[in-house]
Amino acid sequence: MSSLSAFLRDTRGAAATEMALMVPLLLVLMFAGFEAGHYFYTEQKIIKAVREGARYAGRLGFSNYPCGGTIDSTAVAQVQQVTRTGTISGQTARVPNLALADISVSHRCDDSYEDLGIFRGTNGGAPIVLVQASTNYNSLFEALGLIDSSVKVQASAEAVVNGI
């Protein structure tokens, strides 16, 4: 009986046992933090990309966005390229796996501005360009099989065409 009570009062190794119990939880929290940070970083990159694409589209001429018509295909290709790479002649995508097909460019016209400012004389009012992008998220730890690749990162931005 004395050996049992001596065993229960012995605290040697308690810190090692507590550490062994806490390490898995701490590792999960650490890797979850890395993954969340990487996701938000990727999301921020795609948000910035569509904003730049919309800003570029807004600086193209009014003739590229006819109200009641279709967007000029050259303008669409340029906006997609700027959104994907940051430049018209760029090669490297800002976001991994972001392809030109993942970027859509559309427009609408707001006729309430037909006789105001720079839109005076334009047929149909102010053209407004919408740039949207959506791609699969590349997880840091997808190889471990913990996160599937069906998670999407997407963003959209609008800009009024200034025709500059």
Image (tube, grey):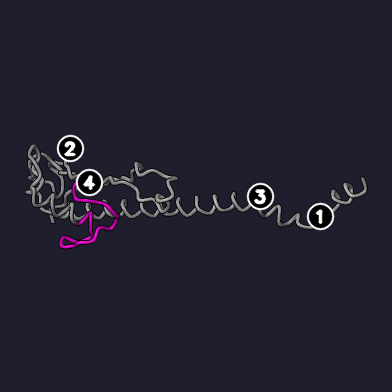
Q: Are there few (<14), some (14-19), or many (20+) residues within 10 Å of tag 3?
A: few
Q: Separation of disc 1 and disc 2 at Cα? A: 79 Å
Q: Quadrant of the N terminus?
A: top right
Q: What amino acid type is highlighted by mark number 2?
A: Ser
Where's residue 84, x and y in %? 23, 55
The residue where tag 4 is placed is 102
Residue drawn at the location 31% of the way across and 46% of the way down: 136
The residue where tag 2 is placed is 112
Extent of the magenta region? 82-103
Residue drawn at the location 18% of the way across and 55% of the way down: 81
The residue where tag 3 is placed is 21
In the displayed structure, does residue 137 sit left or right of residue 16?
left
The residue where tag 1 is placed is 11
Nearer-N-terminus badge (1/3): 1
Nearer-N-terminus badge (3/4): 3
Q: What amino acid type is highlighted by mark number 4?
A: Asp
In terms of secondary structure, where does tag 4 sit?
helix
Q: Separation of disc 1 and disc 3 at Cα? A: 16 Å
Q: Separation of disc 3 and disc 4 at Cα? A: 45 Å
Give yes or no for residue 94 being in the magenta stretch. yes
Q: Which tag is nearer the camera, tag 3 or tag 4?
A: 3
Residue 93's place in the image compared with 66, above or below, is: below
Q: What amino acid type is highlighted by mark number 3?
A: Leu
In the displayed structure, does residue 146 sit left or right of residue 125?
right
Residue 93's place in the image compared with 149, above or below, is: below
Q: Which tag is nearer the camera, tag 4 or tag 2?
A: 4
